[in-house]
Image (cartoon, helix red, strand yellow):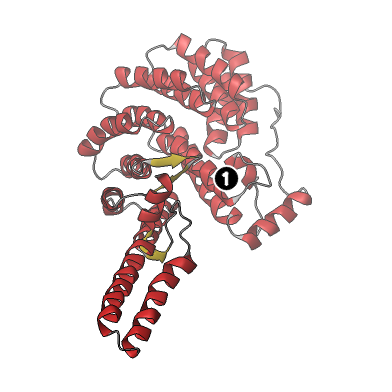
Amino acid sequence: MTMEFDLYAILGVPREASAEQIRGAHKKQSRIWAKRAVSGDPSVREEAELRVGRLDTALDALLDPSRRRAFDGQLSRNDVQPSAVPTPVGGSRSSANWVEQARDALAEGDYHSAAYAAREATHSLGDSAEAWILRSRANAGLGKLDDALYEVRQATTIEPNNPDFHFHAGLVHEELSQWEGALSSYRTAAQLAPDEFIYPLAVGSVLLQNGLIDEALLTIEPVHAAYPTVRVVNFYLAQALLDKAESVPAMQGDGAYRVSSPDEITTMRALVGRVASLGLSDDDVDYRIRHIADYLDRMEKRTWTVPRFPFGYSTFKAVAIPLVLGVIAFVLFNSGAAGAGFVLLLFAIAAGATTYGLCWVPGWKVNRRARQ
C-alpha cells in the first residue's frame, strides 16, 4: 500500500491515535466536508468529493492493523511528500491565470499550489473577493485556520451578500470550534439564500456538535421533509437520530451511557430503525447502527448477577440457602417428620424461585440496580 497523502493529517489525529479517536475524527471531518460536497461551485464540490474520499480511505486503512503498519513504515521512510509549490515559468502570469490555477489546484486537493497561486492572485488583484476566498480555502486545507478566517473576512467585506462566502466562513469557524461564529455565518448564508437546503443543514450540524440534539432535529427534519432523497440530507438526519438514540438513557457519564429500562431500549430501537430505513450507505452510520443494536441486544440478555444487600448477599448464599433448606426437608421426610419436611420444602422452592428472580436478570436491570 502506497499513499500520496498523510492519513493521520487528513483526519487530524496523532500517529498513536486509538481506533475510537480515529472514528471520532472521521465522524467530525465527514460532517464538515459533506456540506461542501453539494456546493454549486464545481471546484468546491470537486475538492469536497476528493476530501471525503480521502477521509474514507484514511479510516479504512488506519483501522486495519496490517495496512496501518505498512503506512507507518511509509511515513518513517519519508515516502509521503506534500505537493510541490509551483513557480512561474517563462515570465509573469496574468492575475486571471493565477485565479484559474488556484481553482484547479483546489479541485485536485493540492493546497500548497493553490495557496501559492491564490496569494499571487490577491497581490495582483487586491480587492478581488474571488482571489481572497480561494486563498482562504487553500489555507483551510493546509490547516492554517487563523489565516483562512482572516482571508474569508476579506472576501465577505468585498462581497457581503455572497452566501457561499459566509458559508465558507462558517466552515472555518466550525473547524476552529468557534461555534457562535459558525452559527452566525451559516444563518447569514441561509438568510441570503433561503432556497438552499445546505445552509440550514449546516446550522443543524453545529447544534448537533454542541449537544443541542432536539434543536438540531427541529432544524433538519423540515429539510428532510422537503428533500427526502438527497443523500447529504439523509446523512445529517441519520447523525441527529443516532445522537438522539444515544442520549435516551438516563445514565450518562464520561462520554458513555448505560440503559436501565426496557422503555429506553424500545425508544432507542425505534430511532435506530428509522436511521436504517433511510437506506444510507455510509461506513460511520453503519458502524453506529451496529454498535447501538449490539449493545441493546446485550442489555436484553439475562445474566447471573447477585444484587447488593446490606446483609452481604453473595452468590454462595444465594445458591446455598435453598439447597440447605432442600437437604433439611429431605432429611425430615426420611425421619418421619413429613409435615415439617413438606413445609420446609415449600420454603426451599420459594427461596430458589426468589434467588432465580433476583439473580437471573437482563443487563438493563443490572444497570438500574447500580444506579440505585
The N terminus appears in which quarter of the rendering? bottom right
**Is 366 situated left or right of 16 in this image?**
left
Against 207, is 338 above or below? below
Number of residue marks: 1
Q: Nearer the viewer, residue 351 or 93?
A: 351
Residue 190 position in % (x across, y down):
32, 22
Residue shown at the point (66%, 42%) measured from the top left: 14
Amino acid type, callout 1 = Gln
SS type, badge 1: helix
Answer whether residue 94 is visible to the viewer in this image: no
Answer whether residue 346 is visible to the viewer in this image: yes
Residue 262 position in % (x across, y down):
28, 53
Against 82, is 284 above or below? below
The C terminus appears in which quarter of the rendering? top left
Q: Nearer the viewer, residue 45 or 72?
A: 72
Residue shown at the point (46%, 35%) measured from the top left: 32
Q: Which residue is mark 1?
A: 21
